[in-house]
Amino acid sequence: MGKEGNRQFRFDEINSIILHMLQYACKALNFDYFRANYYIQIMKTIYCIGELLIDFVAIKQGNDLSKAKEFTKKAGGAPANVACAISKLGGKGQFIGAVGNDPFGTYLLNVLKENRVDISLAQRSKTFTTMAFVSLAEDGERDFVFSRGADKKIEIRL
C-alpha cells in the first residue's frame, strides 16, 4: 500500500499494535506485562463506551480526500479497538454505543462478535451508522472527515 509510512492497517492489526503498546508501556514503567495481562483477565468486565464506525480509507491519493476515487471499508472507533484488545488479552470487553440499523451497523457488530466482545448493551438507531473518511499522507499522518450518525444517538437506559 505504498511507502512504509503510508501503510493502511486492518482492524486486527490495530489490536495487535495496542497489545504491543501495552507491553512497551509495562516495560517503560518497570511493570510486569504478565501481571498486567493477569489483571485484565481477572477483571469482571471492562466497559468501552463510545463510537463504533465505518472508516472509509482512501486508496492511492495521498492526503487529499478531494482527489480520492476509491475507498476501502474498515471497522473503526477507538473504544471498539480497545474492547477487542481486551478480549484478545483474555479479558472481558464490553462495548456500549450506538450504530445504525443498517448493513454497516450489522457489519460492525459482527466484527465485534468475531473478536469476542460483548455487544449486549450496544444500541441500534434509526439514524445511519457513523462514517469517517480517512486519507493517509506519505509521512503516515491521517486526516479525517466525519459524517456523524448513530454514535451521537446513544440513549441512557436505566
Image (tube, rainbow, N blue to C red):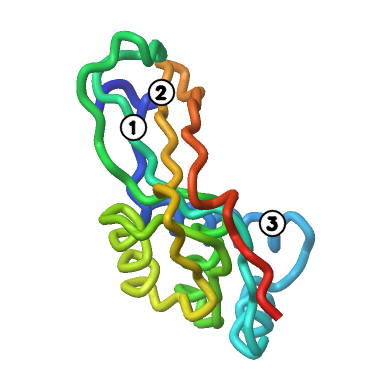
Q: Amino acid at mark 2?
A: Leu
> Mark 1 or 3 closer to N-term?
3
* Residue occupying the far left of the picture: 70
Q: CA distance from mark 1 to mark 3?
A: 29 Å
**Residue identifier under label 3:** 25
- Circle 2 packing at 10 Å, graded few (<14), some (14-19), many (20+), is many
Identify the residue shown where x is 30% and y is 63%: 106
Q: CA distance from mark 2 to mark 1?
A: 8 Å
Residue nearest the observer in this picture, 105 or 2? 105
Q: Amino acid at mark 1?
A: Val
In the image, is 119 to the left or to the right of 44?
left
> Mark 3 or 2 closer to N-term?
3
**Residue 120, relative to residue 11: is it above or below?**
below
Per the image, label 2 sits on a secondary structure element best described as strand
**Residue identifier under label 1:** 57
Determine the image quadrant of residue 79. bottom right
**Residue 23, relative to residue 37: is it above or below?**
above
**Residue 153, relative to residue 37: is it above or below?**
above
* Residue occupying the far right of the picture: 29
Judge whether residue 40 can be spotted in this image. yes
> Mark 2 or 1 closer to N-term?
1
Identify the residue shown where x is 41% and y is 23%: 136
Residue 53 on image: x %, y %: 44, 49
**Residue identifier under label 2:** 136
Residue nearest the observer in this picture, 124 or 97? 124
- Circle 1 packing at 10 Å, graded few (<14), some (14-19), many (20+), is many
Determine the image quadrant of residue 65. top left
**Residue 116, relative to residue 98: is it above or below?**
below
